[in-house]
Amino acid sequence: MSLLGLVLTIFVGSMLAALVSRFGRLHAAWLSGVVVVVALIQLLFLMTPVIDGETTIERWSWIPTVGLDLVFRLDGLGMLFALLILGIGLLIVIYARYYLSERDCMGRFYAYLMLFMGAMLGIVLSENIIQLLIFWEMTSLSSFLLISYWQERSDARNGARMALAITGAGGLAMFGGFVLLGEMVGSYELSVILDSGELIRNHPQYLTVLILILLGAFTKSAQFPFHFWLPNAMAAPTPVSAYLHSATMVKAGVFLLARFFPALSNTPEWSWLVGGAGLITLLVGAIVALFKHDLKGLLAYSTISHLGLITLLFGIGTPLAAVAGVFHIINHAIFKASLFMAAGIIDHEAGSRDMRQLNGLWKYMPHTALLAMVAAGAMAGVPLLNGFLSKEMFFAEAVSAATYLQLGWILPALVTLSGIFAFAYSIRFIHDVFFNGEPIGLPKTPHEPPRWMKVPVEMLVALCLLVGILPTLTVEPLLRIAAGGVLQAPLPYFDLAIWHGLSPALLMSLIALIGGLLVYSLRYPLFRLHDRFEPYVQASKVFDALLRALHALAAAITRHTDIGSLQRMLAWFVFSALVLGISGFAAGDGILRGPRTTLPLDGVSLVAAAGVIAAALATVLLHRRRLLSLIVMGAVGLIVALIFVKFSAPDLALTQLSVEVVTIVLLLLALYYLPQRQLPESGLWRRARDGLLALAAGGGAALLSWAVLTRPFTSISDYFLDNSVSGGGGTNVVNVILVDFRGFDTLGEITVLALAALGIYAMLEHLSLSGPTVDRRGRPWDRDVHPAIMGSLTRILLPMALLVSLFILLRGHNLPGGGFIAGLVTAVALITQYLANGVRWTQARLPANMHPVIGVGLLLATLTGLGSWWFGYPFLTSTFSHMHWPIVGEFELASAMLFDLGVYLTVVGATLLILIFIGMLHSGDDTEHKPAGESA
Amino acid sequence: MEALLSLIIGVLTACGVYLMLRGRSFPVVLGLTLLSYAVNVFLFAMGRLTIGQPPIIREGISQYTDPLPQALVLTAIVISFGMTAFAIVLALKARAELGNDHVDGRES
């Protein structure tokens, strides 16, 4: 039993939920419920040391080379949040099963929900702040998926996008803050950071770190001016809203404030920034909530207001205020979840959320009405309900903070104002929905929901009452543990009594109650006033305008730079590379020729050089006569292979030779489908410009080569030369590097090759091109395209060619050869069959489906690498031994050879897949008579 | 000899760049191929030029050429083929979808 296991349980549950949903509609719901219960049980066991006041730290090695460990931490604060996340999560799982309709995909919903839940758990249980950040970003992403669950609705898509943009931007800022903080403290682990409060607060970069981290916290917890994404996220299914608003997402922001409270608080900057944002959010949320006719809209702004309240408490910064903040986190989670669920029930059973339509529901759903009214009472802060207790503490803190602030009376005054509006919107929620006459134009007659849809609400409302009436017996122990986790210090004295005598806080509550009733009775004139000014003060409109401006700017930049001409772009690219190269040359010491002695020239080399230069130039001059230029270019490739032979690179020469063959076949095949006619050439000016650029590029490359080649150098290759035989078991160092020393690179490279082949396959599928039927002089194509002699010869040659490739493959570890070369040779041998005998003949004997070959090759290479894990070595450690075979003699067997076999199979598969599919593009039905390859 | 090889690299680069700046897809692919020859030879030459010392360990021989650039270039050659194939298939696809073989998809 471990914290890692706890988090993983939820993530695995997410995947399973997606899987099981295909076997039945409700399976995902059941599975999620069971998984959350299992996680809760694990948490109960893990909690024991925390209840005794200890902090559990669990460490798993993650990326040790950069000092990153997977570290989990369970202390009081984490425990409280884990309980909230899992406990309310379980109720949401039950509720959603009844809320979602037949049309909604259950598997997708529960998979996203569990993903989100797992990410939230990860945040609250992380010890390493980089790890915390990763989970943080995961909540942004998974909440995006949840909010946009009803993808077909544009408001859901817009809301999800807005939430992602805002919280994502905040996460980015927070990332910066965390990195600075980590560098400042010298550790990314919370235990160290929380102990370094003095160091952090006195550091010159304290303010930067504070602002960056607060940006992350404020965007997530919807503090002004980033609050507007939350109401727009209401487009999510109601269970999601209930979850986001109560135990998760927005609470992640206040969790962060609580988490870093010991390290960052207790400075004027903290008080002004956190307290200021909290106060404004508290007021704005409470006032706007009253004017929302949408039931969920009212609740959303109420959430904003309550988050402002919690933030303000942390901003006040005294230990007692922090305790009150934690208390309100608990209470708000409980009553807000139940209120959202009640709102969902009303929406579900009455078909509307508009409070101008919903009236008098008391008669139709008295049970739900009662539950909602109790919860709304808790939201308003009515005595004997949980909201009252934390609100009293909050008022008391506001009053005591006022004693040491300049103009201190403003704070309690504004807080009371927010209390007035909180009462007013709570009364509106109760009165407008359940009383106030008869429903107006509802799409259906309201009725009570299914039994189990109400059970989660009932449980939460019962909690509201229990906490409100018997605080010391119910919530106090949990609150003490959690607050201890926040403060990381002994708790201040506090008393959770319902009656504190006649205190200023009680007076403020009374004013709020009376004022709230007054404001509510004046609501109609206030609504009219609001309707007049509302269009001018919408933050989301500002956001939309900013976003539109950004899009317009991006579009303008694209329009002006990307004019859709590859030629123009390439010319600019070459030009920029030249400018960079020349400035590099100019900044150097200016000496081109290095001190290294050069090799003497010889006649054969001169002739070969003349040949390759002539062939390259001819390719350019003849490029409008395509077939001819292709043949000449083949000559260039062959001479390049000779260059490799000359300068001690037999492996390269073999590779170049075999690649040359497949390249030419490939281009010949492609040529068949490209226009044959003479094409207009670009104008003289264009050609001159390109010629100049090309000359400059070529000159630069030549000078650069000359400068490098004439200078001495040191190489890291001595290691490879020394260890090739002893460590890799092969004498061909190039091959040993490929399959052993740098085997991981090779694995990447064959993966790229496989991807290229699959990409080509994807592009060519369903593509049909017609080749020419007559040649340039109008003569029909020769139909006798498979000369009998050639056909028979290639069939005889095939086994021999395959044998040669096998030989090359096997000897590759010690002599020039190996998987790449052998694969290409095999591919050439098989392609020859297509060319000489036609597609139909060959396909009858050789399956064209090369995907399995590629797959097996990649799998083999990967498994060879994984195999070394089995023996406790790092990935791709090779082993070898010598064994004696009868007749063959001494034979060496290296695990790297298995890897090379994987390389071989991938190369064969990829090459054949590409060539066969281009060859089979032909749309005509006379494939047998005219395979594409014959066009050459 | 070094000068000669530098010249070859330069010529291959120049021819490759010129062809890549053409308007039709086929010369562009030819240019890409030429340029990848140039790049491969250039990378290979970074191990400096040696004659008759292939990096294959034998008894009694202690001088070998640098094997590392060779290993890098070997895979580069194969990947170049993959890239050429991808580019030419893109050209084919563009021709099928757009009806011409101009790199920008429009006759001009």
Image: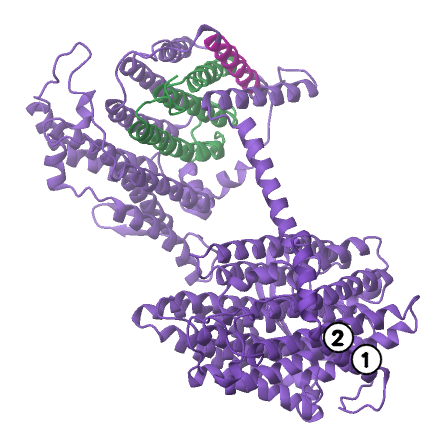
Specify whether residue A601 is painted magenta: no
Residue at 55% from the left image edge and 72% from the top image edge: A242
Left or right, A805 with reference to A263: left
Element on which disc 1 rests: helix
Q: Helix, strand or loop at disc 2?
A: helix
Q: Which quadrant of the figure contains the C terminus of chain A?
A: top left
Residue A310: numbered disc: none
> Colour in which chain A is shown?
purple
Give the residue type that dot 1 points to: Met
- Asked whether the viewer can see residue A127, the reply is no
Instruction: Please indicate whether residue A658 sits to the left or right of residue A354 in the image.
Output: left
Q: Which residue is mark 1?
A: A508
Q: Residue A409's spot in the image, x, y percent?
A: 89, 71
Reply above or below: A608 against A115. Answer: above
- Residue A359: quadrant of the picture: bottom right
Question: Counting other residues with Cα less than 10 Å from the Cα at mark 1, is it few (<14), some (14-19), or many (20 or more)?
Answer: many
Specify the amino acid type for callout 2: Gly
Magenta stretch: residue A687 in it?
Answer: yes
* Chain letter tied to green: B
Q: Are marks 2 and 1 on the same chain?
A: yes
In the rendered view, does A170 fall on the left or right side of A502? left
Say which chain tag 2 marks.
Answer: A
Main SS category, magenta section: helix
Residue occupying the far top of the picture = A684
Q: Position of residue A809 (x, y in %)?
A: 29, 40
In this picture, which residue range is highlighted in magenta? Answer: A686-705
**Residue occupied by mark 2:** A419
Q: Chain of mark 1?
A: A
Q: Marks 2 and 1, how far apart in space? A: 8 Å
